[in-house]
Image: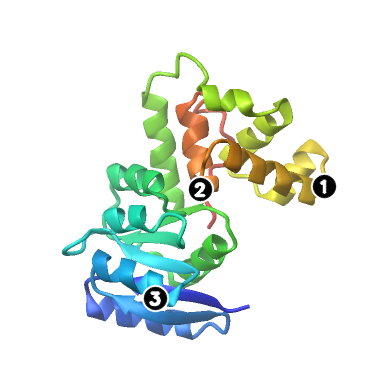
């Protein structure tokens, strides 16, 4: 099954480089390019890509604003040279499904696209560590958000493991469940909490105090 990709970056040379990397893969197809966020939004509505590689700093409309407009339309993988915490938080809350630095190896970029297209979430390992450290500095939530009360005890268990970065198969092994059952639990969690994907579930788990930093186990690396 071919994964359709749109590349959004204001630097033509980088777009060309990304295109060359992606088009060498038999399951990836670059369906278009955009030089700013406004072009990216228009191109997504016209070309219907599965994944958008989205730069952050672009003219007219930046990548974060474009990502917000594309919520529910496609999956966005943020690519930037700026390894700054505020971009990570804003990107995830805007609806991005992944976040990688532009200096990541080509094989990691290709893997990231496949992971995001499959509906999973991906963060670069160095960014994940900083994300968790930031949550560790915040005061714990005084009470569990009302939305979490809608989750069953089993769903809360599954969400904790999702926030630790475990895959569906790993969660199935941990809880002695079938993988299809775990997938159903994850889908219900995202639906009940109005979350787009696993990346936002990680943020919600830490911000709500459901999972405390230092007990996270393996982080959501994806690479």
User: What residue is shown at x 62% (from left), y 33% (from top)?
Assistant: 160
Quarter of the rendering occupied by the N terminus: bottom right
Residue 77 point in image, percent of width and height: 42, 61
Q: Which residue is mark 3?
A: 46
Q: Which mark is residue 178?
A: 1
Indicate which disc, 2 or 3, sits on the residue closer to the N terminus: 3
Q: Is residue 16 above or below residue 192?
A: below
Left or right side of 102 for 108:
right
Give the foreground label among 2 and 1.
2
Which x, y percent locates residue 132? Answer: 44, 35
Whether residue 192 is visible to the viewer of this picture, yes or no, is: yes
Q: Residue furthest left?
A: 59
Q: Residues within 10 Å of mark 2 (few under 14, many from 20)?
A: many
Identify the element where label 3 is drawn. helix
Secondary element under disc 2, as helix, strand or loop, is loop
Quarter assignment of residue 134? top left
């Amino acid at each position: 099954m071919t994964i359709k990709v749109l590349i959004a970056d204001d630097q033509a040379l980088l777009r060309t480089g990304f295109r060359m990397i992606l088009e060498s893969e038999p399951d990836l197809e670059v369906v278009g390019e955009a030089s700013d966020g406004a072009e990216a939004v228009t191109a997504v509505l016209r070309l219907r890509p599965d994944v958008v590689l989205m730069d952050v700093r672009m003219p007219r409309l930046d990548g974060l604003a474009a990502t917000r407009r594309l919520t529910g339309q496609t999956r966005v993988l943020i690519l930037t040279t700026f390894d700054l915490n505020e971009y990570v938080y804003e990107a995830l809350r805007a609806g991005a499904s992944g976040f990688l630095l532009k200096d990541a190896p080509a094989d990691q970029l290709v893997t990231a696209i496949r992971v995001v297209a499959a509906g999973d979430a991906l963060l670069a390992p160095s960014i994940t560590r900083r994300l968790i450290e930031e949550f560790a500095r915040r005061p714990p939530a005084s009470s569990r958000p009302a939305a979490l009360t809608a989750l069953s005890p089993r769903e809360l268990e599954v969400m904790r493991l999702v926030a630790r970065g475990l895959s569906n198969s790993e969660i199935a092994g941990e809880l002695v469940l079938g993988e299809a059952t775990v997938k159903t639990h994850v889908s219900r969690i995202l639906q009940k909490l109005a979350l787009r994907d696993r990346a936002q579930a990680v943020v919600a788990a830490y911000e709500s105090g459901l999972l405390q930093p230092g007990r996270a186990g393996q982080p959501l690396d994806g690479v």
